[in-house]
Image (spheres, rainbow, N blue to C red):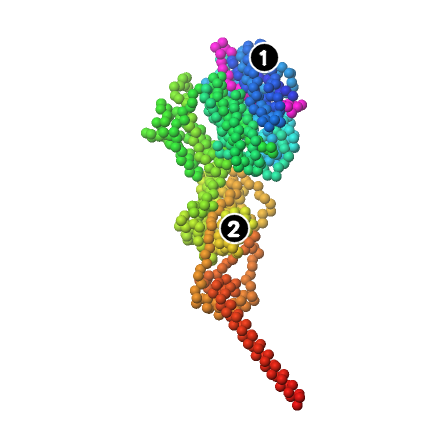
Amino acid sequence: MEAGVVVLLLFALVGISSTLNLYGDSISLMPAKSNLDGTFKVTFYHRQNGRSICEDQFCFNCESSVCTGLDESIVLKTDQDNTGQHRWCQSERHTTATIRTKKNSFSLIDCSKANWTVQAELDLGRRSDSHALNGCPITTTVSWLRSPQNCFSGLPLLAYDPDGDRVRCRFAPSPSASPAAANFTVDETTCTLRTTGQVAIGVHVFELVLEDFPRKNITLTYADGTSAFREPSDINSPPLCTVNLQFTMEILPPIPNCDAGHVRPMFLSRTPSHGEVLHATVGQTFQLYAQAQAHRTSIHDFQVSGPQNMSKVFKDDEFGKAEVILSWTPQQSDLYRSVPVCFTAETNESQSDMRCVVLMVTQAALIQGKASVTCSPNKMTVALEKASMPDIDVNFLQLRDTSCSLTSNGTHILGSMSFTTCGTKLEDKGDFLDFVNEITSFELANEIIVRRKAVKIEISCKFPKSISISSYYNLGNSDYIFTESSFGSFGYTFEVYTNSNFTSKVPAKAYPVVVTLLNKIYMGIQAQSDLPNVSLFVESCKATPDDNPENTLTYELIRNGCIKDETLKVHPSNQTAFNFELTAFKFSGNYDEVYITCSVILCESGNALSRCAQGCVAQPARRRKRSLHKETVSHSITQGPFRFVEQEVPNAAMEDNNRRMEKSDTTAAANPPPVSSDTKPSGGRRDFAPTVSSGGPWGIRQILNTDTSTVVFACVFSVALVLMAVLLLYFTRKRKADNQKSLLGWDN
């Protein structure tokens, strides 16, 4: 590193290229401390992942010309496989080195002289933004990572920097790991391991380099009086710190179902989000709670990568759920340490995604304050009680994005922010999505000392991944809330209206909506989003006789944006609304209810490549790839049920229909109604049952479906039988008499 003092730590990963007993390792450095004699003290923590024996960590040598002291702790096993099969384990040891500043670098070399070395480089300049020495990126993994071949979609790795610097991840040039040849790649900005094609079944070895770069202009000042200026736009500037990470991943044979929560465990909402920063206090026990669920198998353990003396309590719950409580009490030596903790839920067939958090160790508990958060579909509002934070200067509080300001009145500190602004982050909680921000205290760059207490208050809004209350039709409104990274939080309402003006909604007490066949039904879909230029597109709508959209008995109303029902009429509306009317119908058979389910998409307005701009696509040639940042995925929303009743038939109409019954049947048989193949429903058909008010003739089936007509028909049928018997008897006797006369005439 130019013009700076560099600490270079070198050590070897023993035998990973030749044996599977060692799965990998990681190091994390505490911020270096300057001593009165001009030396620096550097402490780093080394975690080693293995299969059976994890306590046999390698030793280090220190060059006497650079290092004046080397203090190594004992190696302690932090976690291991509880099945007795010795499939994985992890250990940790910390090492403290005292170094001289006259040298630009110093080396810690493995005693075994192995070929594969790991390095950590640290610039010892004092930063102008924090007045402290630079901190290195924090990272680690659990010991044994594995995924079925057909289920691997990416591995987000922990890449946290305590100074808030930008962290870049890349593959290290190593003869022992060749991820590019195995169709693996790494996203440098998100530090996510991905695939570029099908990956082979077996164990894959990875070595990554994590580097941090400042997000704003800073000046680094060194012990010899020299300085260096760093700016974020300088792509050629060296990193402030470099650390390496080694790990292995086993690709397992494919499994039938990759859905999270089926065989692969899914984390539930009480589990911390990946990358979340938690706070622990010296001398006080910190607890981390995680919960996961797998419906089709059982979770037998949680694999954990954590610090020494962290205890684990596992509990197997019903319905495929399991939970773990991790407890750890930081010591004085852990003060200001950033501790990485990663964990996975384990089953025999697979494991969950890996989640990692960072524990920040402080001297005293941070002031939390009392905050009241109000959540709406697209934003959150916070009101913080001043009385809960005595001696706190409001002028030194900020949100994650310092460009967003907080306001204040006599009793509260107030803030309002969209889910896509002010540094609000979207965190996947498994069964919930969480929008999280925080109010923290800050220091001025030119302050030498401070006497203000530190403040950290987390504010969040939590939503299920999809909210549907249409199943509880007595609630009336069918509200849906969804979240996506490019569109933030957005919602849909699916309403039933009383007329074609679409201004008067059917009240909640009127559900289920009672309708009469052939009457008009008025419905409207409305999208809500904080984004200014979005448009709504209804891709499909279908009817089912129950609230299961996957029912095989369906009737299509709209398909691929094209109207398929001849009675459906779309009314003009704005770009975020879709109002339409439909003639009421019912499914033939013993069904008296209908549910309507529509598939909707939200698009960036004016974008010619979006699905909204394509409109009706009668025969799509192939599955279209969704345009990221231009449209959302397709979401299903449901309205219903509509319950159908039949009108009473007046006696006069019945008599008139009886007189015309034979004529009607003859006409209907001679002239059957035309059937359109384009409007033929998939899996079922609908009955358009005319009422008296429609003026249409009744057919023989409708006549037979009434009790009165059945009695009349029975009477007529009985009389006809009697008449036929009388006529038969008459003609029989008459023929016998004629025969007798003929015989008498022949005798003569």
For the residue labelled by badge 1, is the local secondary structure a helix, a strand or a loop? strand
Inspect this view and state whether residue 649 appears: yes
Q: Please state the horizontal and vertical placement of residue 313, each as a whole percent of the image.
A: 52, 27
Q: In this rendered view, identify the residue nearer to me: 431 or 291.
A: 291
In which image quadrant can residue 75 be found? top right
341 lies above or below 651: above
The residue that disc 1 covers is 62
The earlier-in-sequence mark between 2 and 1 is 1
Q: Nearer the viewer, residue 368 or 116?
A: 368
Height in image: 655 above or below 403? below
Q: Residue at x 47, y 57 (%)?
A: 517
Could you tell me which residue is drawn at 63 percent across and 33 percent down?
252
User: Is label 2 in contact with label 1 (beta carbons under 8 Å)?
Assistant: no
* Secondary structure found at label 2: strand
Q: Which residue is mark 2?
A: 544
Q: Is residue 61 above or below residue 512?
A: above
Magenta range is 16-39
Residue 194, x across and y down, in percent: 59, 32
**Amino acid type of the residue tagged 2 in the rendering:** Thr
Which percent across, then down, holds residue 41?
52, 14
Q: Is 327 placed left or right of 64 in the picture?
A: left
Q: Residue at x 52, y 50 (%)?
A: 544
Q: Quadrant of the N terminus?
A: top right
Q: Does residue 206 appear in this view?
A: no
